Image: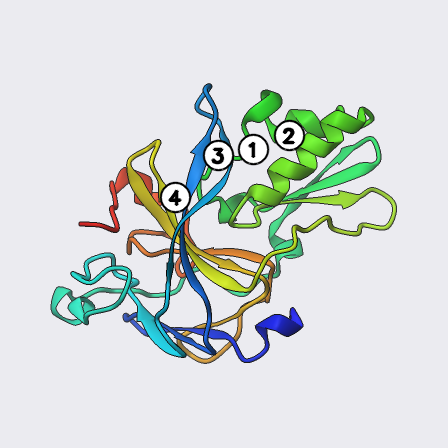
Amino acid sequence: MDERAAGMRIKVGEDGPYTVTGNVPLLRMEIVVNEAGESTGWREVERLEPGERYLLCRCGKSGDKPFCDFTHASEGFVGTETAGHDSYNEQSVSIDGPGVLLRDARKLCAEARFCDRGGGLWNLVGMCADPETRALAEEEAGLCPSGRYTICDEGSGTAHEPELEPAIVLIEDPQLGVSGPVFVCGGIEVVDAAGEPYEIRNRVTLCRCGESKNKPFCDGSHIAAEFKDWE
């Protein structure tokens, strides 16, 4: 765990909200795209100040989004966690390239589309002998909020992870007109409803539309659900 994340915790409620403790910063950021419509970066649009402890909506129905207003109770929200506790390495496959190894855990995909530039990250990995191509591949993998992708050194297996402030980011996707998942940055602990911790990772995306089939993690269902934080 990142020392800066010590004391920070997200507890998944049984059919209820995420309980966040430890003065975790809460930001809203939107996906930036280029002229071709490809995701290229992040833009901070709001920094909230919710305090030491707060509840984040998990059912997608709260009238006080992103915070819980207990609508889940009246709506009969079923938030059963189906993701399991397999580690990232257990869930991912590896793709070899010159000097690099790309790990890909497809099940974690949050459909943020940072992997599309330059013909797609999978194709870029095969051309990483070129320094510029390798830099683009590392950039695309590092921008992926779910941590689906990780670029590693071929020999040592050392992962190239971005330096992230421990924080919770509410993702907005203006290009698609939807709100995305809860982006958990910087190694904050996430604990399931039974009290068992998930693997601590630098990048994790949690469902906030209530529709994911891989709860508590996002599987991109917010797009088909046309989920909007502001409605």
Q: Which mark is residue 113?
A: 3
x then y, percent, for residue 185: 53, 59
Q: Residue at x 69, y 38 (%)?
A: 138
- Residue type (three-letter) at the residue carrying disc 3: Arg
Q: Quick check: 201 left or right of 68?
A: right
Q: Which mark is residue 99?
A: none
Q: Residue at x 60, y 61 (%)?
A: 201
| Mark 3 to mark 4 CA distance (whole Å) | 11 Å
In primary-sequence order, the first of circles 1 and 2 is 1
Q: Are the two marked residues, 3 and 1, in contact with CB atoms closer than 8 angstroms?
A: yes
Q: Which mark is residue 220?
A: 4
Crowding at dot 3, Cα within 10 Å, few <14 / some 14-19 / many 20+, comes out as: some
Q: Are the two marked residues, 3 and 4, in contact with CB atoms closer than 8 angstroms?
A: no
| Mark 1 to mark 2 CA distance (whole Å) | 8 Å
Q: Are the two marked residues, 1 and 2, in contact with CB atoms closer than 8 angstroms?
A: yes
x then y, percent, for residue 44: 44, 48
Q: Residue at x 29, y 52 (%)?
A: 211
- Which residue corresponds to mark 2? 122
- Residue type (three-letter) at the residue carrying disc 2: Trp
Q: Residue at x 16, y 61 (%)?
A: 63
